[in-house]
Amino acid sequence: MPSSPTKKKPTLLCLHGWGGSSESFTELRAALKGANVTILTPDLPGFGTEKEPRRPWTVNDYAGWVEKFVTQKKVTSPLYLLGHSHGGRIALKVAYRGKVKIKHLYLCAAAGIRHKQTLKRTLGIALAKPGKLLLSLPGLRQLDTLGKKTLYKVFRVHDYEQASPVMRQTMVNVTREDLREILPLIKVPTDLFWGTNDTMTPLSDGKVMEQRIKKSTLHVFPGVRHRIHRDKAKEIAAIVKEQIG
């Protein structure tokens, strides 16, 4: 009697958020320890140990990089794709492009829903350079360090101020794109994980995605903020394990 074919071990590919790295999934790796799954947590270009792109990138550029990574690593089906924040934005675009066959999509506080630029953030970016000039004036130099920290804390533009010119424009490029229109075209079963206290990608974004992605389920966690992939790693892992089998 012929032996049954060996079942392929599934792969979970995790994409971190802006400013993060593979370290972002430390808790999730621990929660999935012993599970029948190969976990890949690469650093995205411009973060961790991965070099910056030579030119400013778009969401499509990041999606293309992920597709190339899957090919180079010879990842075989079934492939499960998880993304947090910026990584979620990329995961959505990868699923939409359809160049990589995805079994299931997991979005943790995913970015991708564009909001009108708030006056506070607009002023923050506009003042990033003038603020330094102002604080360099005689009599204000001693306030330079504290002043800059206060300025960027108030206007919440830390990531923009700390980035290189290439990554600054990359940030502008990726946040400018609104992915609402592609959501109904995503056919992959999707689980959405969101915290009620997320101020970076608000719960309303998760609800938009749940409404527009046909095969989606929204899991809401009271009191949790943007780092849901870390704070609720055990709960996310439990759902992943159940679906991978």
Image (cartoon, helix red, strand yellow):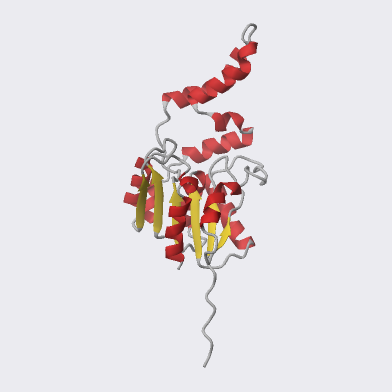
Question: Position of 134 compared to 214: left or right?
Answer: right
Q: Residue at x 62, y 19 (%)?
A: 145
Does residue 19 sit above or below 234 in this rendering? above
Residue 72 placement: quadrant: bottom right
Residue 152 appears in the rendering = yes
Badge count: 0
Does residue 70 sit above or below 47 in this rendering? below
Q: Nearer the viewer, residue 79 or 29?
A: 29
Residue 125 appears in the rendering = no
Question: Position of 62 compared to 121: left or right?
Answer: right
- Taking the view exactly as shown, the residue that stands out farthest to the top is 139
Q: Please state the horizontal and vertical placement of residue 36, each as a whole percent of the image.
A: 53, 67
Q: Please state the horizontal and vertical placement of residue 6, each as a whole percent of the image.
A: 54, 78
Residue 165 placement: quadrant: top right
Q: Nearer the viewer, residue 28 or 155?
A: 28
- Taking the view exactly as shown, the residue that stands out farthest to the bottom is 1
Q: Residue at x 60, y 46 (%)?
A: 21
Q: Which residue is drawn at 44% across and 54% down?
A: 236
Question: Position of 86 compared to 193: left or right?
Answer: right
Does residue 83 sit above or below 2 in this rendering? above
Q: In which quarter of the image is the C terminus?
A: bottom left
Q: Which residue is drawn at 50% across and 47% down?
A: 230
Q: Nearer the viewer, residue 107 or 118?
A: 107
Residue 9 placement: quadrant: bottom right
Q: Please state the horizontal and vertical placement of residue 79, each as a whole percent of the image.
A: 51, 63
Q: Please state the horizontal and vertical placement of residue 126, each as a whole percent of the image.
A: 52, 22
